[in-house]
Amino acid sequence: MWTLVLNSGSSSLKFALLNPASGEVRLSGLAERLGGGEATIRLERGGEKVSRSLGGGSYAEALNEVLRELDALGIRQEVRAVGHRIVHGGERFSAPVLLTPEVLDAVRACVPLAPLHNPANIVGIEAAQGAFPELPHVGVFDTAFHQTMPEVAYRYAVPQTWYRQHGVRRYGFHGTSHAYVAGKAAELLGRPLPELNLVTAHLGNGASVCAVAGGRSVDTSMGLTPLEGLVMGTRSGDVDPGLHDYLARQAGLSLSEITAALNKESGLLGLSGLTNDLRELEEAATKGHAGARLALDVFVYRLAKQVAGMAVALGRLDGVVFTGGIGENSRTVRAMTLRRLGVLGLELDEHANDHLPRGEAGVISKSVQKKSGQKKSGQGEARDPLALVIPTNEELMIARETAVIVGGRGYAL
Ligand code: ADP
């Protein structure tokens, strides 16, 4: 049995056909510049890569191309469900859900909370329901995992009516990734997830940390929108809320101009004046580029502060997990971050960090057993926390959650 996982952006559609039980991927790819006149689709099947033009491609045309591939692979009849990544589920969705017309209306009602993302998700869902009318479609929300956050973590100190009437609160994102790597960390450590207190750091172009207590999110760095928290590729992360008023007066910028700059011209790009790509920044920093050096330093400093803050949410810390393109690949960022986190009892294992094979999970800190005097009764051996690298797999998580909703059997989460 196969599940088609779709992630639709404002002009792109990412797709993957997976077996939720084994994780095997039969087909994957990305359609880009949809609706822009020069759409292309890239496909990968069995190690073979092809790229085609989609003309003035729409989402429907991209999905037709996927359908043709499924036919060519002779696998179309074995596809049981379609899983959709949806960015914002507001307070309404705390779990994946079958996408009925009523549910789609509720997703539409969340558009004001994610005006950049949810409309694109909805376009993708409608196109996919047209292309695969006979299959169940399931929505998996980026925000759902964080609905377990306590009020103390999700409320802002703003007038109550803003929360009650307009839903102004912290929601958090990247939930699928945080949940997945927390589960994988428990497997790697050989300990039950319900007993573990972890901070997971998803570091890609977007970046967030999450405090995961016993498999449940209890705090996270992103908020009402994905702009809050860490320094990201082009997003600022936390700034003073007084900044908008100041810049409007001083620079004559409009609210939307400021918001666009905070989303698209800030973060690593803004600080370095060079690029949002961390790998390029590392190279430039090595060659002495001051902006690149500063961008790396601020990125790491803010990340370390957030991780330490999340430890407060957990009380006891068992592990810090690095994931996402940066977390999985940048030993520099991991080393710089861990060097700042000695206060939490984390000690970098340089050899393990430098030699972790690409794409693999592993422990990159030294395990120092605490002295028996520090052992707390009833809590077993007190251990220093470990730092781990765990490759994320949001597509697999979405495929599994989709399979569970449509009644698949034996897909352990
Ligand atoms: P997205 O959030 O778009 O899915 P990714 O998770 O793919 O992004 O992460 C992209 C980031 O990962 C980029 O900043 C990129 O430079 C960084 N990255 C990827 N590979 C490496 C590497 N080998 N070393 C350092 N950074 C890397």
Image (cartoon, rainbow, N blue to C red):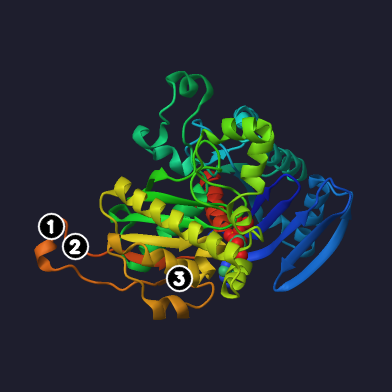
Counting other residues with Cα less than 10 Å from the Cα at mark 3, is it few (<14), some (14-19), or many (20 or more)? Answer: many
137 or 281, which is in the foreground?
A: 281
Any atom of ligand 1 within 8 Å of the CB at mark 3?
Answer: no
Is the CB–ligand 1 distance for label 1 below 8 Å? no
Q: Quadrant of residue 217?
A: top left
User: Dot 2 lies on which element?
Assistant: loop
Contact check, label 3 and label 1, Cβ < 8 Å? no
Q: Which residue is mark 1?
A: 376
Looking at the picture, tell me which residue is in the foreground, 93 or 203: 203
- Report how far apart the C-alphas of labels 2 and 3 lie in the structure: 24 Å
Give the number of the mark in front: 3 or 1.
Answer: 1
Task: Give how far across and how far down residue 54 sits, in percent.
Answer: 87, 55
Spatial CA distance of label 2 from label 1 is 7 Å
Residue 24 shows up from this direction: no
Image point 19% across, 62% down: which residue?
Answer: 382
Point out residue 175 in the picture as x, y percentages from the top left corner.
49, 47
Residue 29 percent across, percent down from the top left: 72, 60
Q: Give, as a three-letter code, the residue at label 2.
A: Ala
Query: Is residue 176 in view from this perspective?
Result: yes
Q: Quadrant of residue 413?
A: bottom left
Q: Secondary structure at mark 3?
A: loop
Name which residue lies at 56% across and 51% down: 398
Q: Amino acid at mark 3?
A: Ala
The residue labelled by disc 2 is: 382
Q: Mark 3 — residue?
A: 361
Q: Is residue 279 above or below residue 110?
A: below
**Relative vertical location of residue 127 with respect to residue 44 in this rendering, above or below:** above
Horizontal side of 180 relative to 348 (left or right) equals: right
**Label 1 environment density (alpha carbons within 10 Å; few <14, some 14–19, many ≥20):** few
